[in-house]
Amino acid sequence: MLPFIALVLVVLPEVVCYTHIAKCAIGNPFPIQHKYYHSGDFLIGAIISQLYMFSNLIMFKRHPPEELVGEFIYFLARWIYLASMELLSTHDKLIPNYKCDIQNKAVSVIAGPNPCYFMAAVLSIYKIPQFLYGSAPVLNDNIQATFFHHMFPNKDKEVLGILQLLLHFKWTWIGLLYISSESGEMFAQSVLPMFTHEGICFDFIAVLPKEKISADLNEMIADWLRTYRIIMESTANVILLHGENQIMIFLRMFPMVSVFEDISDLRNGIIWIMTAQMEFTSLPFQRTWSTDFLRGAISLAVPSRDVLGFQKFIQMRNPVSEKEDGFMRIFWEQAFECSFPKPILNEDGGKTCSGEERLETLPGSVFEMSMTGQSYSVYNAVYAVAHALQAMLSSKLKHRGMTDGGKGMLLDLQFWQLHHFLRGVSFNNCAEEKISFDQNGQIEAGFDIINWVTFSNQSFLRVKVGKVDSKVPPDELLTISADDITWPSVYNQKYPLSLCTENCRAGYSKVKVEGKPFCCYECIPCPEGKISNQTDMDDCIQCPEDQHPSNGQNLCIPKAIIFLSFEEPLGICLATIAVSFAFITALVLGIFIKHRTTPIVRANNPNLTYILLTSLLLSFLYALLFIGQPSKILCLFQQVAFALMFSLAVSCILSKTTIVILAFMATKPGSWTRKWLGKQLAISIVLSCSLVQAAICILWLATSPPFPDFNTHSMPGEIVLECNEGSSVLFYSVLGFMGTLALISFRVAFLARRLPDSFNEAKFITFSTLVFCSVWLCFIPTYLSIKGKYMVAVEIFSILASGGSLLACIFFPKCFIIILRPELNKKGQLIRGQN
């Protein structure tokens, strides 16, 4: 497809919104030159680069003969230098650095991306304004750059737009192909660090082979085959392509490689991302080739608008009536596969061109009827020059009188004088778009995001799906509608991915794989207690204290608040046991009170017995304080009441055992223990032991009392509402004192186990204290190892078990005699047992 400039080079004497079609033609001394203007018009020169090949070369049947080399219209540096010099010379006379007439003067030059570097070397010497409709060349001379006006938007915005496009679709595994030129090297150098910093990796980075028009075609084909194999072996589904128009010709050859080489067809599902300087270009023999490989491609493009009358203007082109247009005739023959009569060469050219063929009947792969971005840039460049000339004329008319309508003034203008007016030009074109330049001569515009949609008839459609806005902050450059994108058919319109490794789903984190890019990693489950709630997280995160990970470790959920309640089976069971033990204790107390006059009750110190049974009764009832939702008052009473009641019970046992030993020692003649016997001794032992425990409890409550607390760490998925002991030292001091009393009682009872006693109460006390001590010795490690509400259950069980052992071992034998063997409850039996 030829751009707009290949069809017409417009010269506008005035600022108007229609195209002036020149009728006169002036002979072209060089085969590469075509002119359209009236004598005396202000001229706009254009230097473009194009590539044509004739069929024998394409079919590889024979090398082109030397006499046909002229059929190549291929601008090398020497052709560009020649064209640039001719612009500076007198009409039809190439005399370098000399121009004898003041008319037919080129006021500016428009160039495509390829010839501009060589053109600048000549034209910049004369300060001629130069418009570039392709990407900016790499100019080592800042002076040359001064005379360039870029119709191509800022390339930095293009790179940022591509980056945000990749990040938008989370394409982090891509390939990069770029042309072998200074601009390609600069593109790669700017892309690599920026993309890597944003988390994008490159599966491959390859330089596209140079296009060669030489006899060594095999070398060129081999280079492209190597590039093709790189693409085939890649695992990246997205390939970033930086090139110029002619690259599309070679890119279209990729799907055809498998026909000639033992290589599989081009991998399906590749999403090409192309830079804005690329347009669709094909050779005549490629008209029947499939364009499916472009389906779903995304390219940045110079924004283009529909210009009123452009398509009508294109349809009016006729190579018969415009015989002076050599470009038109060559294009016509190649596009319609025909030839115009050549009387000089007597050969059969096949189908003859009538000149009546219609351009709109050509497929899009051969010729596009719509105005492309490059053609739109040329259109705007022409009008920019016209507006600058008009501004320059207006400025001169303000300072001089009206002579010759002002045209004589402009005929005497110098090239450099137009730069000032070009920098400040700003106008609305016929497409109602504002055109202006910044201080560096760069057009103030962004880029369109184009999605390529292909059809089976080798035609295609460019669909605008977004834009890169140059006037917004860098992080907001990209606007895109993903729902409007047509993806390659292999994806069935599903969202495509391009990753080195499948995304680590929530609940997993990434681990780097040694020797591979950072985009390649392994996924490992989050450790216990941590989650990852997004894909591809580098590290798992800890849940808040009041939350815990879900089963999939992908979100934090609130922990359930638990405590030992009366509604659950364990709470019901313990409460029932406590109430049952309390009832039995009360029943035993009632039996002893009822039979308080019997010898067995009187012989066992009834007051201590009543105190012991009452303390056991209260201990069983106080165990109920440990069940239910903890509160501040309950926490204060739980441990203190339990400690005081059990200390009272154990001190009673110690007192009973001590009195038994002293009583038997007093029976010996002259024993000094007689004076210790009596109620005062029993009360003294009980009070002294109870007061010591009470003092510890008061110190505990005064310094660091127990309090209700939310334990978020003991259970992984639950918050335990419990009574915090406050001071662990004082808590274990209370238990330690109670244990000490129990050990002393056990020791004293153990010494009295062989005393003569019909009911052998010392032995019962020994066994009960042994069970009591065993229970609390087992309690400490169990309490420290268990978690949650079961800690409370263990403490309740220890209270019930130790209290039950005292009740059973000390009082059940006596109750058995009182109720079932009353004949043994006599004084004579007691005396006999003692003897």
Image (cartoon, helix red, strand yellow):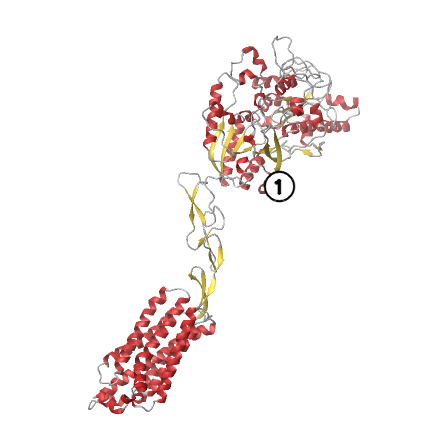
Residue 70 x/y as whole percent: 58, 13
Mark 1 falls on what kind of element? loop
| Rendered-image quadrant of the N terminus | top right
Residue bearing mark 1: 472
Residue 116 x/y as whole percent: 59, 24
Image label count: 1
Left or right: residue 25 compared with residue 600: right
Residue 392 x/y as whole percent: 72, 27
Q: Considering depth in this image, is 416 or 579 the residue closer to the camera?
A: 579
Q: Considering depth in this image, is 594 or 647 the residue closer to the camera?
A: 594
Three-letter code for the amino acid on which mark 1 is drawn: Val
The residue drawn where x is 63% and y is 39% is 471
Residue 556 x/y as whole percent: 48, 56
- Give the answer, above or below, for where 673 lies relative to 577: below
Q: Give the residue at the far left of this rendering.
A: 669
**Can residue 189 be seen in this snapshot?**
yes
Q: Give the residue at the far front of this rendering.
A: 820
Left or right: residue 754 compared with residue 624: left
The residue drawn where x is 61% and y is 8% is 346
- Give the answer, above or below, for where 182 lies relative to 685: above
Q: Considering depth in this image, is 242 or 82 the residue closer to the camera?
A: 242
Label 1 environment density (alpha carbons within 10 Å; few <14, some 14–19, many ≥20): few
- Which quarter of the picture shows residue 585? bottom left
